Amino acid sequence: MSIRPLQAKTPPPSSIEDARFAHESEEEFARLLDFYGVHWQYEPRTFPLKHDADDGRVLEAFSPDFYLPDLDLYIELTTLKQGLVTDKHRKIRALRELYPGTNIKLLYKRDYLTLLAKYGIGMVDEQERLAPGEVLISSSQIERRLNELGAQITRDYAGREPLLIGVLKGVTCFMADLMRHIALPVHIDFMTISSYEGDRSGAVRILQDLSENILGRDVIIIEDIVDTGMTLQHLVKMLQARQPASVSVCALLDKRARRLVETPIDYVGFEIPDEFVVGYGLDYRQRFRNLPFVATLRPEAQIEPNGPADE
Ligand code: 5GP
């Protein structure tokens, strides 16, 4: 018996108005994708996983929540209890075995909440009392890497005058330091773009545009951190439409493990684990940008009512 996914007969819903979401977290996720211009379809396919040996009836099937056609990627959002997640895991494993080449990603509750918290949504009480935790990248590690990145860019752009475009505000420290390690006549410019705020504001907007015309220029986009990749993809598209001679990307931090949208990064400072980080320009609710290192966040130490016991 051949195994094929069942395609919905009518076109699958691909807008908030048409979709009937099973859970409000799915609707919020759809809004986030809309905001960054990532096309999606809601539950477009059902993948049969088990058939009755006698009559071929489908005994078990799985319909991932989202399909992102441009990325050929299915996404299952799981905001459920751990017990149910285990069952989803099993189904996804079966799906991968039965339908090789199918690209599917499971977003856990934690992934989803940190994705939203990044935009200041939810978990306020929990996150309000956060403080810098472990230093992930020290000032001297940053300095060493700046030397290497600067030398590499200097070599790659020899004979040219690249235009460094920084995306505010997180990029401030990195931009200021990096440009001093490039031994070429660089130009700089900045832009500010809106980020998702969980409202109905539609799509990424330019809040403050470049002051330079980039037509025919060699542009290097300088980013603080690439996480899902949605901001960067949008930005690259937006700048490419202005017909520069070339566009490359230099990011201080790359949180590879969380990528949803693949956009090539030409120069990466550091690959970091799936942790929310602050410092060296990066903020948590506008705080901690002025730390000279990159650190994780942890709950602020609990002060015990009677103080620590003397031993
Ligand atoms: P993306 O669109 O790749 O998911 O997100 C990129 C933007 O989210 C970054 O430019 C940055 O402003 C913010 N961001 C992503 N991860 C972190 C993080 O760990 N710490 C901070 N402070 N901002 C982050």
Image (cartoon, grey):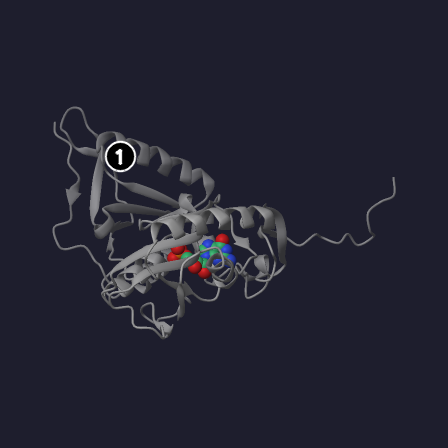
The percent position of residue 134, horizontal first and vertical second, equals 62, 46
Q: How many marks?
A: 1
* Residue furthest front in the image: 159
User: In the rendered image, which quarter is residue 206 located in?
Assistant: bottom left
210 and 228: which one is in front? 210
- Measured as percent of width and height from the top left, residue 17 is found at 25, 66
Picture coordinates of residue 182, whole percent (x, y): 44, 56
- Assign a secondary structure to mark 1: helix
The quarter of the picture where the C terminus appears is: top right
Residue receiving disc 1: 95
Relative depth, front residue between 238 and 203 = 238
Horizontal and vertical percent for residue 71?
24, 49
Residue drawn at x 41%, y 36% is 86
**Residue at x-position 59% and y-position 48%:** 140
Q: Nearer the viewer, residue 162 or 91?
A: 162
**Ligand 1 image-quadrant field:** bottom left
Which residue is outermost to the right? Answer: 310
The outermost residue toward the top is 53
In this rendering, the answer to whether 120 lies above or below 256 is below
Kind of residue at disc 1: Leu
Mark 1 Cα within 10 Å, few/some/many (few <14, many 20+)?
A: many
Whether residue 195 is visible to the viewer of this picture, yes or no, is no
Q: Is mark 1 within 8 Å of ligand 1?
A: no
Q: Is residue 88 left or right of residue 180?
A: left
